[in-house]
Image: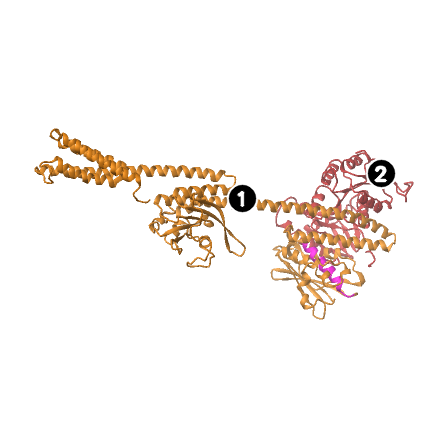
Chain colours: A orange, B red
Amino acid sequence: MKIGLAPSTIRSWLLAALALAAATIGMLAVRSSLDRAHVALVYLLIVLCGSAVGGRALGVALAALSFFLFNYFFLPPYRTVAVANPLDWLVLAAFLVTSVIAAQLLDRAQERAAAAERHANEVARLSALGVETLNAVRAEEALGAIADVIRSTLDVDRCEVYVAARDPAAATSLRVMAVARRPGIAGEVGDVTRGRASVAGGESDSLMTWVAEHGHAMAERLDGTSRIASRIAPRLGGRGWPRDAEKDGDTAPPGDAIAGLETWHDAADTRSLAIPLQVRGRTVGVLRIANAAGLTLRPDQHQFLSALAYYAALGVERSRLTAEAERAEALREVDRLRSAFLASVSHDLRTPLTSIKAIANTIASSGDERAAVIEEEADRLNRFVADLLDLSRLSGGALRLQPELETADDLIGAARERVRALPGGRRIEVVGHDAGGVLVGRFDFVHSLHVLVNLLENASRYAPPDTPIEISVERGGDVLRFTVSDRGPGIPEHDRERVFEPFYSAAHGRPSDSGSAGLGLSIARGLAEAQGGALRYEPRPGGGSVFVFELPAADVHEEF
Amino acid sequence: MSRILEETPSPSDPGGSGGRQPSILVIEDEPRVRQAVREALAGDANRLLEAGDGAEGLLAAESHRPDLVVLDLGLPDRDGFEVLRALRRWSSVPIIVLTARHADDDKVRLLDAGADDYVTKPFSSAELRARVHAQLRRARMTPLPGGDVPVAVGDLTIDLARRRVTRAGEAVHLTPTEWGLLETLLEHAGRPVTHRQLFSAVWGNASGDAQHYLRVYVAHLRRKLEADPYNPRRILTEPGVGYRLELDEPATPAAPG
């Protein structure tokens, strides 16, 4: 990566120079008995050794020097650069070309061998990581290992893995999952999460969140400014890995996904790079590598980074799924507890109510009016328990719906069966709609009956004695519209929505001795809405209330 | 389990002179509820047997051969459904189930498993008494209503043999489907019939559009037989379960308070 004068380089140059000098002196001593070919071969040997040890530069330097020494000492006239026999020029030229080419070839072969070794190492590391990613008990451990390998392989100061979480308000937050640092470097490199990203679409709180939100890689310059690694973004992650990887879903490691970095890596003023981690086209996290001295990557390192980034993405996704599964398990447990609680409350409250009500009813039938009061109160308590259970099911989403093709006839008939006896000469009348056919809807009968009975009982509480409570039903477009009307006092305008709040009447001084716990209307609305219907209040012309209860209508294509 | 069955001789009919007293077995674990059932039923010349759990109940049913069983669904030793099925394996005794569960598919399951009727806790003693009477009377009745003799109820006469129905003296025309429904309801008169029982009786086991329209057919039948289809007195809706044909004159509703 870096070319400098390392001690090992100086040593190999010195050694080569010594070898050249020794060979030259040795050959001078026996020059009379030497052929040109001997000299050429000895020098060629030194050039090859030199380039093997010191690389191409040393090899070429040795070739040039040998060329001069060959000419100067071993081609007559000696100790001049001139050459007596013109054919000797040919020998010299052949020597020079041969030695330079040999040096080049040797160097290239060595480079290939080194690259192959690096590659083998990386493959071994990747497969080890793959196994680790799959086996690690906690995804965090696997991510830590991945960050470690990336950092040490790319020889950078830091490697960090962040997991992205989107809250309901669509704001992205990042949480550090794993950090690997170069030993001895504690501090931060670059501005990670503080400050605002000074880039296009700079709404984000930081460079990192910007990357997570937009799914583009981002490079940070040494001077602290940022830029989109725009030319790499589409390949690196952008909206996706390369086409063929996308096609195979997330299982295909994105081979050359990061190849676009080649256009970027020569920008040596970069100190950190943030890459979106994506699974199935969704950004699940961000990987950041940083190096205070600048960041330059070889093509094979890009590939390595790309593959590892993919592993990291899988790790982040896995940790998310694990957390989700744990949450779902917890919710199931809560749900199970809720059901058990409801069943227990239902049983434990209803058992004593059963004996109270039945015995009170027996006594009442022998003429004791006080027993009738006990029975009524038991009924009231039972309704309240039922309401509480319903409210709990509604709010917990545990309400079970069984929508069927049902008739308005059945619903109204069953509701009147439930509220057969009304006190004080109040009576129920069904108005309108006699000529029409049977009206049909698709709804849950039991819950809808509960709503209608609730409305009738509510109306009977407020209707003046000797006035009718009117039920009507009609088909209006896609809905069956039931109305329950009374001639009671009605509801003042500012309370018309609030009557549907739980415990409204108890808190607002409507007659609470009438058996209402203030749950009825809120439950009724909940039950109506749960099955795609609606419940609302309307003032009645001429005084009183109208409750409009709508249910999904259905069509019957059949002759009767 | 060695608790001795209590027998409560009915005080109103000490000698048992008016024919055999019907015996009723109550299988219920809660002593108070058992007491409530006892008080509800004791006044009507019934002999009561009581059992506190399922095993005891099954034993008592076998050794005493009661005329009716009142069975609680929530028993300590085994599920009420299990007791119900065990009883049904050898006995056709009328069974009324006490259920604290409000889930209606439970009621449907009960009826499908062979229960004749159910009473939801908390119940009034009058309600329980009425159901028990209906079952006892039905068990005594032979032949089934509508077999040979026309059934007359209120202003309605149903003559199954001649396939004739009149309301207030006027002939009512019924379609074949409506006849099928009426026959099935009559066969189970006084008892709830589930939707499934109804449509398998009328349409066989064929599944088709017809079964979805069951309720629509019933609505049409009701419009022909009831004076006020929105206030039915004969074909009553059992919410979430099915229908019940009521042949008794409705009891006078309790005086409004």
Q: Is residue B11 above or below residue B55?
A: below
Q: Is residue A248 visible?
A: no
Which residue occupies the extreme bottom position in the image? A542
Which image quarter: residue B19?
Answer: top right
Residue B28: image location, x then y, percent: 78, 41
The front one of A15 and A298 is A15
Subunit bearing disc 2: B
Labelled pair 2, 1 in contact (Cβ < 8 Å):
no
Q: Is residue A556 visible?
A: yes
Disc 1 marks a residue whose amino acid type is Thr
Residue A139: image location, x then y, percent: 50, 42
Residue A294: image location, x then y, percent: 37, 49
Query: What residue is disc 2 on?
Result: B6
Considering the numbered disc 1 on the image, is that residue within a helix, a strand or a loop?
Answer: helix
Which image quarter: residue A198?
Answer: bottom left
The front one of A217 and A297 is A297
Mark on residue A338?
none
Q: Is residue B156 left or right of residue A367?
A: left
Disc 2 marks a residue whose amino acid type is Glu
Which residue occupies the extreme left position in the image? A84
Which residue occupies the extreme top position in the image? A33
Q: Around disc 1, counting alpha carbons within 10 Å, would you say few (fewer than 14), some (14 to 19), or many (20 or more)?
A: some
Highlighted range, magenta: A446-464
Query: What residue is disc 1 on?
Result: A322
Main secondary-structure element of the magenta-colored stretch? helix
Pick the quarter of the image with the N terminus of chain A.
top left
What residue do we see at 43% from left, 38% from top? A127
Disc 2/disc 1 C-alpha distance (Å) = 59 Å
Considering the numbered disc 2 on the image, is that residue within a helix, a strand or a loop?
Answer: loop
